[in-house]
Amino acid sequence: MFQSFVATTTPATGAARLAALRTVLAEEGLAGFLVPRADAHQGETVAPRDERLAWLTGFTGSAGTAVVLAEEAAVFADGRYTLQVGDQIDTTAYSPVASHKVKVADWLAERLGEGDVLGYDPWLHGAEEIARLGERLADCGATLRPIPNPIDRIWEDQPAPPQAPIVPYPEALAGKSAAEKRADLAADLREEGIAAAVLTLPDSIAWLLNIRGSDVERRPIPLVFALLHADGTVTLIADPAKIGEEPADHLGPEVSVVPPDVFGATLDALSGPVAVDKASAPIWVSDRLKDAGIDVVWRQDPCILPKASKTEAEIAGAREAHLRDGAAMVEFLAWLDQAAPSGTLTEISVVQQLEAFRRATNALRDLSFDTICGAGPDGAIVHYRVTEATDRPVTPGDILLVDSGGQYLDGTTDITRTVATGPAPEDAIRAFTLVLKGMIAISRARWPEGLAGRDLDALARINLWQAGFDYDHGTGHGVGAYLGTHEGPQSLSRRGEVALAPGMILSNEPGYYREGAFGIRIENLIVVTSPEVPPLGDRPMLGFETLTYVPIDRRLIDTALLTAEERIWLDAYHAETRARLSSRLSDDAADWLAQATEPL
């Protein structure tokens, strides 16, 4: 299986490792040190070598930061991990802090004083982050100092860097050649008077050069850096051993490869101005350029927006990947409906069976993330990952939340379905229906060009708000094309400031979580469609096309809470699901689908 159920951390190691780190910090004359969940590429998924936060504290969430001071330490995690962080860390050594309520900088400013020096690894933080933190600490007289990561000095069995090979990605699926992409972006650099742009995000480099890799789990990317020059050539910073004959031919003569140990010297040799993304590039890059006397221009990674707006070929691939994945999901849900009443299932057995159905497509390259499968109260842990130690029986009558996805060569999927395994309590049915109303509202949305995700986010929440409910995560995130499950800059959230544009793929996943009882989330992937003029309208509007077609559990719907338009939408969605998937299913699953998609 792709997914393992072995717990990789334990709270029991936290205190000893914290003490070892404090010894090093005292030797360095530091008042504290920052430990982000990050690597030099600012990736959401990091290689085992870079799991410093998990190694030190036990917390395995995809985002978070530990702050270690001489007498106090804290682990900051956002609303997705409120329950998880408390379970995974030693709370006698670390205090869990909600990062969406308390900022790291404010917490530090209350505890540091005149002359205190806070250390940080310059490979793991962007210039924008460090600038903001430095300004805040100046208020209390503290300063920042970049240092080699002290955790690497005490982590005796730290894994080696990954060395997976780079592989070409078919142009037919990308929809545009690497040469065209390089030429287009280079023209923009020349127009702005920029000599080169430093690329540090592996997803950007994979997209630009039409390559993929497997240096980290769940994301088909190589961990590399690159320089895009204004003449359209690229310098790829990668171990030459990762590039075989086929990738070399694919890259062509306009892409040169230099090893990582000369990255600094390669930067030193540039002629400015050089563009650097202040938000995502490690501050080491801009500091190195400035030390060499090279002008640095703060500019967003030039690949970000073009990558987000998918080509027709990428959208066509996404549609096919979602139909393939949807059929696997229906096979799974049909099996689950038959097996759950027996009372013999556990969360792990459910995850194993779902992966088996995806593997049966013979097209699965990897999971797009570890499957989240929470029965009853585990469903309230937003990013719950079942282990052998936490495996809970799926009891008939539980509300079961399953959030999962697959990586296929033609697309990345991400879907959540919440199902009843027996008679459901009325409060769960009501909450499920309110969540469904929000998901439908986003699906049906029309809006004028120029609006961002923050302008639409409330559509998913308004019915929950009126009932006194909410959820502490965004309504939707961007999704890549056989790349990351979480892709920026597009999002449906209060922080989504980038205008939505045709071709952007996003998730649509409102939820509700009742600690100790159940969790509810319903998620489809959607793609922004080109302008259209609605009936009786006089202004072009953007909208969403649904990519995910899998039934929504009608047993959890209180139809009295739905409007006529919502019932029409859901019946039409189920009819379309039946039409698209029936021919792809086994006879038993097709029969189950026919019943599951009957009109309300």
Image (spheres, helix red, strand yellow):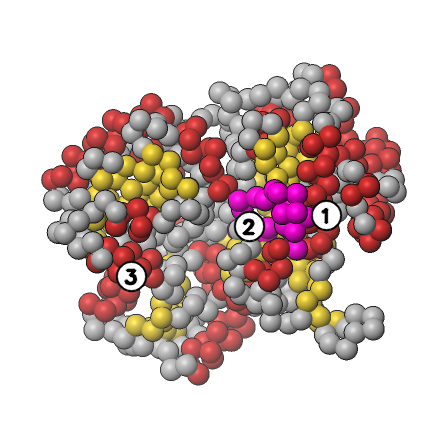
Task: Tell me the residue that label 1 is attached to.
Answer: 437
Q: Secondary structure at mark 3?
A: helix
- Residues in magenta? 459-485
Query: Disc 3 or disc 1, which is closer to the eye?
Result: 1
Q: Which residue position is annotated with label 3?
A: 131
Q: Is residue 501 visible?
A: yes
Q: Which quarter of the rendered picture does the N terminus lie within? A: top right
Q: Secondary structure at mark 2?
A: loop
Examine the image and state in which quarter residue 277 appears.
bottom left
| Viewer-closest of 141 and 453 | 141
Residue 348's disc is: none
Q: Amino acid at mark 1?
A: Lys
Classify mark 1: residues with Cα within 10 Å, few (<14), some (14-19) or many (20+).
many
- Residue 212 percent across, percent down from the top left: 51, 53
Q: CA distance from mark 3 to mark 1?
A: 42 Å
Q: Earlier in the sequence, mark 3 or mark 2?
A: 3
Residue 480 counted in the magenta span: yes
Name the one closer to the observer, 503 or 325: 503
In percent of the image, x 41 and y 81: which residue is there? Answer: 192
Secondary structure type for disc 1? helix
